[in-house]
Every structure is written in structure tokens, then in C-alpha cells.
Amino acid sequence: MNWLLVLLGGAVGACLRYLTDRAVQARHDTVFPWGTFTVNMAGSLVLGALAGAALAGAVGAETQLLLGTGLCGALTTYSTFSYETLRLAESGAMFFAAVNVIASIVAGLGAAFVGLVLAQAVFG
């Protein structure tokens, strides 16, 4: 049963990732990968909130598998982040490559922290 929860969450997460990435990137006329940045921040926020809810005992293992492993696992993408950062650097857009790395780390950790704190305030 666990694999089915991961499968279902992953199917939704992958579709959300693709649709969100395309919608966000279409609105920005820049080489910066705003679509990937957006899905990674959204996933970090959701995963932080899920962790906070789990720590408070508000969600069980099944929800963690469905939303954490499945949805967030498919929604977020380290490989695309890495590829796009290398692509930026190789094309000479070193500033955007550096901003992508620094902003992704700082904002991703910040989003996870905000999600954690919010969930603990609601469920704690």
C-alpha cells in the first residue's frame, strides 16, 4: 500500500511541477529558471509544513508518504536545478548561475522553516 501512496503523490507532483514550471517561465523573459525555482520553493514550504505537522502528531505515516515522498519528491527537482545552473554558467551567465545557487539554498531553507513554524503554530 505504501508504494501506491508514493505513486499517487508522485503522479500529482510531477504534473504540478511541469505545469507550474511552464506557466511561471512563460511569464518571465529572462534566462533565470524561475519555474524550477518556484516549484522548489513551494515544495520546500509544503515539506516543512508536513514535517511540522508530523512532529506535532497531526499527520500519520501515510500522509507523509503521499505528500512528502510522493508529491514533494516529484514536485521539487535537484537535478533540474543543477542542470539549469550549469547551463547558465556554460552560457556565460555567471551572475544568474550564482544567484540561482544562493537564492535556492537560502530561500529553500527559509521556506521549509516557515512551513515548519506555521504547522507547529497551528498543530502544536
Image (cartoon, rainbow, N blue to C red):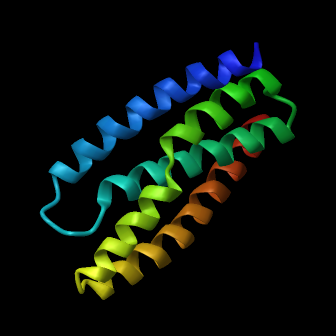
Q: Is residue 31 above or below residue 114?
A: below
Q: Looking at this rendering, what residue extends furthest in the top direction?
A: 1
Q: Quarter of the image for the C terminus: give it.
A: top right
| Residue drawn at the location 24% of the way across and 43% of the way down | 22
In which quadrant of the rendered view does residue 84 lie? bottom left
115 vs 84, left or right, is right
Q: Position of residue 99 (x, y in %)?
A: 39, 79
54 vs 11, left or right, is right
| Residue drawn at the location 38% of the way across and 74% of the way down | 86
In which quadrant of the rendered view does residue 14 lie? top left
Q: Nearer the viewer, residue 35 or 113?
A: 35
Is residue 77 at least partly visible in the picture? yes
Q: Position of residue 51 (x, y in %)?
A: 75, 43
Q: How many marks are shown on the rendered structure?
A: 0
| Residue drawn at the location 49% of the way across and 57% of the way down | 79
Q: Is residue 10 above or below residue 18?
A: above
Q: Position of residue 12 (x, y in %)?
A: 47, 25
In which quadrant of the rendered view does residue 66 lie? top right
Q: Quarter of the image for the N terminus: give it.
A: top right
Q: Position of residue 89 (x, y in %)?
A: 32, 82
